[in-house]
Image (cartoon, rainbow, N blue to C red):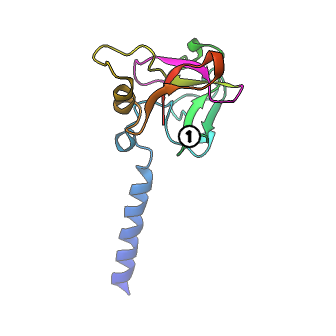
Amino acid sequence: MRTFTIIAFSASLALAALAAGCHDDDDDGLGDNTGSPCETADECFPDVADGGLIGDPVCLDRVEGGYCTHTCTADTDCCAAEGECVNDFDQVCAPFESTDDYYCFLSCEVLPEGYDDGNVFCQENAHAEFICRSTGGGSDNRKVCVP
């Protein structure tokens, strides 16, 4: 019985370690808070102090696995809070598909030096399954990294 208890305890520790690494940047390829996977908005922007974001945190469920972002009214609302953005890539404020709300997204409109393909940029700096595409928000659409 003692051996079974030790094995069960070890297995529990291993499962806990796997669950803790579920949203680790090294595991999912994400380099920033915006675009991180989520199930609820409470999981988004953990390193930003309460009240620091300009806009409300959102977990977009129209993106498989969820997509952390926040509401905005201008590009300057994105990356405005300390701890919100961990890299220097541009983010833009844009509508998403047929919603009337505007959200922050990693931009692939103007690629940083060293990149000539928006899909490669998105896959290397957002997530391996992301592509550079239009937000689909009508006349205000922008090119961003999303699945």
Q: Position of residue 116 (x, y in %)?
A: 32, 18
Residue at the spot of label 1? 63
Quadrant of the image occupied by residue 38? top right
**Residue sticking out furthest to the left:** 114
Q: Nearer the viewer, residue 90 or 121?
A: 121
Q: Position of residue 131 (x, y in %)?
A: 43, 31
Q: Which residues are magenta?
A: 84-100
Decide if residue 90 is on the left or right side of residue 92.
left
Quadrant of the image occupied by residue 113? top left
Q: Nearer the viewer, residue 103 or 15?
A: 103
Q: Amino acid at mark 1?
A: Val
Q: Position of residue 112 (x, y in %)?
A: 35, 15
Q: Residues within 10 Å of mark 1 (few under 14, many from 20)?
A: some
**Residue sticking out furthest to the bottom:** 1
Q: Nearer the viewer, residue 22 or 123?
A: 123
Q: Is residue 65 above or below residue 81?
A: below
Mark 1, secondary structure of its residue:
loop
Q: Position of residue 1 (x, y in %)?
A: 38, 87
